[in-house]
Image (cartoon, rainbow, N blue to C red):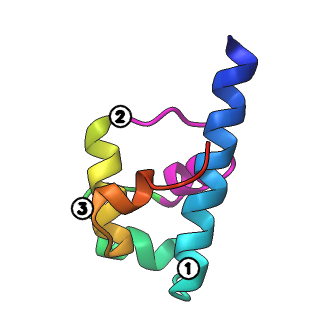
């Protein structure tokens, strides 16, 4: 089960990095656009090392200028 979770977190992180790069945003820019995120959190998410909470998902979506639904729209 842990391997399954780790794989999903990695895929989610890759998706987030792709969304950020498509907009030419640095992690620092995402931090500035969000309310409570720090760069280390974004890095951990993109590297599949963080299982984020709902409020972090909302902050991340705001930082990326996306609807939260778009963050979850990726192939598992």
Q: Residue 29's x, y, as percent?
A: 44, 79
38 lies left or right of 57: right
Asked if the magenta segment contains residue 44, the reply would be yes
At horizontal 32% and vertical 56% (from top left) the residue drawn is 69
Disc nearest the viewer among 2 and 1: 2
**Which residue is situated farthest in the front direction here?**
75
Q: Residue 37's x, y, as percent?
A: 37, 56
21 lies left or right of 42: right
Q: Residue 28's x, y, as percent?
A: 49, 74
Numbered circle sitting on residue 53: 2
How many callouts does the rendering have? 3
Q: Which residue is mark 3?
A: 35
**Which residue is situated farthest in the right direction here?**
3
Image quarter where the C terminus lies is top right
Q: Which residue is mark 1?
A: 26
Which of disc 1 and disc 2 is earlier in sequence? 1
Answer whether labels 2 and 1 touch (C-beta < 8 Å).
no
At horizontal 33% and vertical 62% (from top left) the residue drawn is 61
Magenta residue span: 39-53
Q: Residue 23's x, y, as percent?
A: 50, 86
Answer whether labels 1 and 3 touch (C-beta < 8 Å).
no
Q: CA distance from mark 3 to mark 2?
A: 15 Å
Instruction: Using the rendered image of the protein, determine whether residue 39 is visible from the camera's viewpoint.
Output: yes
Which of disc 3 and disc 1 is earlier in sequence? 1
């Amino acid at each position: 089960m842990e391997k399954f979770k780790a794989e999903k977190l990695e895929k989610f992180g890759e998706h987030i990095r792709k969304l950020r790069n498509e907009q030419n945003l640095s992690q620092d820019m995402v931090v500035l656009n969000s309310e409570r995120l720090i760069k280390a959190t974004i890095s951990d998410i993109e590297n599949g090392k963080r299982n984020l909470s709902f409020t972090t998902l909302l902050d991340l979506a705001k930082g990326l200028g996306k609807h939260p639904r778009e963050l979850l729209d990726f192939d598992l």
